[in-house]
C-alpha cells in the first residue's frame, strides 16, 4: 500500500527500499530482544512489560502519523519508527503493508 | 504459555480483518483506478488513509494489554529468586493458588525474612560472571545453543515467508487473478491474507495449545519440521504444475504446520528450560538468533 501512495506510476515500493524496511525491522527486533530480555531479568518482568507496551503504543501512533517532507525521505521515517516499534516486541506482526 | 503465543494468531486475524474492512470502506475511491500503478488522486488519498488506519489500529490491542499488564503481579519465582523477597513470594504463591490477586504478607515478617535470606540464600545471585559460569558448563551451553539454533532455522523460512504474505499472494497470481481495478487487487490480497491466517495460522496455534502437553514439545517440533520439509519440496518442484489456488492451499498448510509445530515450540521451550534469573536473557538470545540471520546473511525474499 505504501508503494501505491508514495510511488505513483509504479504501484510498488522499489525492491531496495522494501528490503531496507524489512531488514531494519529484523535488526530492531534483534537488538530489542537481547536488550529487553536482559533488562527483564535485571529489573523484573512486570516493569519491563509496562515499559515495552508504552514504547510500542507511542511508536505505533508515530508510525501511523509519519510522512515525508522535502528533506526527509518517507522510507527513512518509516524505518526509524518501525525499528523503535518492533524493538520491544518479541513477536513482530506480519500484515504485508 | 502456548495460549499466550496463540494470541499472536488473534492479532494476525484482527489485522487481516482491519485490512479487509478498510478496503471495503474505501471501495468507491479504489474502484476508479484500473491497477495499482495508476492509482492517483482520490485513489492514492484513500490508500494513504488505509495504511495509516491499519498501522494505527495496532495501538488499540496495545492499550488493552497495557492495562492488564500494569495490573498483573510479578511472578512469584522472580520475587523469590531474583528480588529475594522470600515472604512476599510465599504469600503470592498462596494467594494465586486460592485464586486471589496477590498476597498481603505481614510487613515486619517480610523485611526480617528478606534480611535473613540475603545472608543465608544459597541460590546463586545473577551477575555477569555467574551468567558466563552457568553457560560455560557444556550441558547448559548446549541447551542454549539448541533453542537458539532451532529458532534460527525456523525463522529463516517462517519470517522469510510471513513478512511477504502480500508479495506471495501476488507472485502466485492470487491477488491479480481477475483484478481489473485497484479495489479488486486490494480486496483479493485482503481475502487471501484472511484465508492464510484463518485456515492456517490460527488453527495451528490452537492445535499446539491443545496437544503440547500430551504429544510433547520435542515430537511436535520434529513432526512440524518434517512435514514442512515435505511441503516445501512439493511446492518447489511442482511450482509450474500447480494453479494459484493449489499453491495457496500448500502455503496455507505450511502456515498451519509452522504454528502447529516449530513456531510455537521454539517459543515455548526457552520460556521453560532456563533458570529464572536468566530466563528472559536466554529467551531473548534464542529469539534474536532467529532474526539475526535476516540481518546478516539472508535478506527476506
Image (cartoon, rainbow, N blue to C red):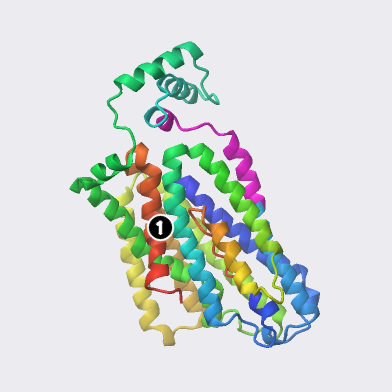
Decide if residue B99 is on the left or right side of residue B28: left
**Residue B94 percent coordinates (x, y):** 45, 21
Residue A91 coordinates in the image, percent (x, y) = 49, 55
Q: Against A53, is B230 above or below? A: below
Q: Residue A88 in the image: state x and y as whole percent.
A: 52, 52
Q: What residue range appears in magenta?
A: B60-79
**Would residue B129 appear left or right of A60 to someone viewing this image?**
left
Q: Is residue B188 visible?
A: yes
> Which quadrant is the N terminus of chain B positioned in?
top left
Tally of numbered discs: 1
Q: Is residue B257 magenta?
A: no
> In terms of depth relative to the viewer, which is nearer, B252 or A34?
A34
| Residue occupying the far front of the picture | A71
Q: Is B73 or B194 nearer to us in this picture?
A: B73
Q: Residues within 10 Å of mark 1 (few under 14, many from 20)?
A: many
Which percent across, then down, holds residue B188? 63, 75
Assign a secondary structure to mark 1. Answer: helix
**Where, by quadrant of the figure, is residue B170 drawn?**
bottom right
- Residue identifier under label 1: B288
> Residue sitting at 67 percent across and 51 percent down?
B60
The kind of secondary structure the magenta stretch mainly shows is helix
Q: Quadrant of residue B263?
A: bottom left
Residue B250 vertical placement versus A90 (above, below): below
Res B106 visible? no
Chain of the residue on which disc 1 is drawn: B
Above or below, comparing residue B278 to residue B172 in the picture? above
Kindly identify the residue that appears in the image at 32 percent across and 47 percent down.
B216
Where is A13 relative to A38, above or below?
A: below
Amino acid at each position: 500500500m505504501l508503494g501505491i501512495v508514495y510511488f505513483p506510476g509504479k504501484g510498488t515500493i522499489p525492491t531496495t527500499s522494501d528490503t531496507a524496511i524489512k531488514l531494519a525491522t529484523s535488526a530492531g527486533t534483534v537488538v530489542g530482544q537481547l536488550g529487553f530480555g536482559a533488562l527483564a531479568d535485571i529489573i523484573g518482568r512486570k516493569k519491563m512489560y509496562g515499559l515495552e507496551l508504552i514504547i510500542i503504543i507511542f511508536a505505533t501512533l508515530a508510525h501511523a502519523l509519519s510522512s515525508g517532507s522535502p528533506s526527509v525521505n518517507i522510507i527513512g521515517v518509516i524505518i526509524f519508527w518501525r525499528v523503535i516499534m518492533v524493538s520491544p516486541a518479541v513477536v513482530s506482526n506480519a500484515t504485508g503493508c | 504459555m502456548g495460549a499466550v503465543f496463540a494470541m499472536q494468531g488473534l492479532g494476525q486475524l484482527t489485522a487481516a480483518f482491519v485490512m479487509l474492512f478498510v478496503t471495503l470502506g474505501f471501495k468507491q475511491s479504489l474502484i476508479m483506478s484500473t491497477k495499482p500503478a495508476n492509482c492517483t488522486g482520490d485513489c492514492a488519498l484513500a490508500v494513504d488513509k488505509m495504511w495509516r488506519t491499519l498501522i494505527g489500529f495496532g495501538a488499540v490491542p496495545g492499550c488493552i494489554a497495557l492495562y492488564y499488564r500494569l495490573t498483573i503481579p510479578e511472578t512469584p519465582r522472580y520475587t523469590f529468586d531474583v528480588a529475594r523477597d522470600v515472604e512476599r513470594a510465599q504469600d503470592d504463591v498462596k494467594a494465586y493458588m486460592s485464586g486471589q490477586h496477590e498476597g498481603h504478607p505481614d510487613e515486619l515478617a517480610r523485611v526480617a525474612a528478606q534480611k535473613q535470606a540475603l545472608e543465608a540464600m544459597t541460590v546463586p545471585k545473577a551477575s555477569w560472571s555467574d551468567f558466563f559460569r552457568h553457560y560455560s558448563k557444556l550441558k547448559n551451553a548446549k541447551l542454549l545453543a539448541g533453542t537458539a539454533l532451532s529458532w534460527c532455522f525456523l525463522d529463516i523460512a517462517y519470517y522469510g515467508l510471513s513478512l511477504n504474505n502480500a508479495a506471495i499472494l501476488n507472485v502466485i497470481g492470487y491477488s491479480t487473478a481477475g483484478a481489473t481495478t485497484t479495489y479488486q487487487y486490494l480486496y483479493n490480497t485482503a481475502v487471501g491474507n484472511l484465508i492464510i491466517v484463518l485456515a492456517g495460522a490460527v488453527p495451528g496455534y490452537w492445535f499446539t495449545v491443545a496437544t503440547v502437553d500430551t504429544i510433547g514439545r520435542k515430537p511436535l517440533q520434529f513432526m512440524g519440521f518434517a512435514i514442512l520439509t515435505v511441503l516445501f519440496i512439493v511446492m518447489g518442484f511442482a511450482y509450474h504444475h500447480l494453479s494459484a489456488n493449489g499453491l495457496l492451499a500448500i502455503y496455507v498448510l505450511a502456515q498451519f504446520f509452522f504454528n502447529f509445530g516449530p513456531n510455537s515450540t521454539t517459543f515455548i521451550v526457552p520460556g521453560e528450560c532456563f533458570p529464572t534469573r536468566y530466563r528472559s536473557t536466554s529467551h531473548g538470545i534464542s529469539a534474536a538468533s532467529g532474526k539475526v540471520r535476516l540481518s546478516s546473511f539472508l535478506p527476506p525474499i
